[in-house]
Image (spheres, grey):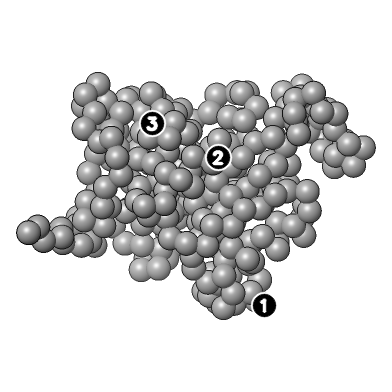
Amino acid sequence: MTQTTALSPEQVKRYSRHIIMPQVGSSGQRKLLEAKVLIVGAGGLGSPVALYLGLAGVGTLGIVDFDVVEMSNLQRQILHHEHDVGRPKVLSAQETLHEYNSGVKVVSHEAPLTSENAMEIISQYDIVVNGADNFPARYLVNDASYLCGKTLVDGSILLFDGQASVFVPGQGCYRCLFPTPPPPGAVPSCAEAGVLGALPGMVGSIQATETIKVILGQGEPLVGRLLLIDALSMEFRTVRLRRNKQCPLCGDNPTIDELIDYEVFCGLQAPAAVG
């Protein structure tokens, strides 16, 4: 679909609540239909992100995930159902999304995102939404998105806490916020510490909203800001972020110009022997 292509009668009816909004209109809905968004992870965060972007009419959704659905996922991962247990998450996600909106193109990348394939995959999309739940993947997605010149909509969850931000190349990155990963084992995963089942829905909805705002060019996305959510007290706090001039990726004198071994970087694997 090009910018001059008129919406079909079915699309006008489906997206009527968008079209009557002055911030969206028919031109904005066409932008959504033309957009290509990559979602990293079809789990807790990726589920609400994918559902709301699919419902909004984002034309192409890429989903990267190599895992299968487990019973413990069903407490929070709303893309999947009981009959999906044991099936690949990308397959379950594709079927669920098409049940909601058959017009959305869902591209499945059923493989781990690695330093070998990240650039090739990410380069195909306009925006990247990160739902990864481990530090090697988070740094990998950040670096690859920046090197590909793609906006990254980031989010994370643990226990009752969540956070979200938007990183635009040239205006800061995840490494500006966290220059180095925590020591191995210092920060537990959701599998180790748990997460409130409803929390991913809250943070994922924020990520989807930020993605739509970026596509439409409307409002003030969370660029240069980190949104912190404490669901126990239901308090939202915003922290200002600045591009770190010393950042090895996006600073004034960058030293990172290619992807590295992120397992080694995060201390989860010893460097390979040389010689």
Q: Residue furthest left?
A: 275
Q: Is residue 201 above or below residue 31?
A: below
Question: Viewed as shown, does residue 76 lie left or right of 189?
Answer: right
Marks 2/3: CA distance?
A: 28 Å
Amino acid type, label 3 = Val
Residue that mark 2 sits on: 125
- Where the C terminus falls, by quadrant? bottom left
Q: Give whichever of discs 1 and 3 has the lower sequence position.
A: 1
Badge 3: residue crowd in 10 Å (few <14, some 14–19, many ≥20)? few
Answer whether labels 2 and 3 touch (C-beta < 8 Å): no
Amino acid type, label 2 = Tyr
Q: Position of residue 135 (x, y in %)?
A: 32, 53
Q: Secondary structure at mark 2?
A: loop
Q: Is residue 238 visible?
A: no
Amino acid type, label 1 = His
Q: Give whichever of discs 2 and 3 has the lower sequence position.
A: 2
Marks 2/1: CA distance?
A: 31 Å
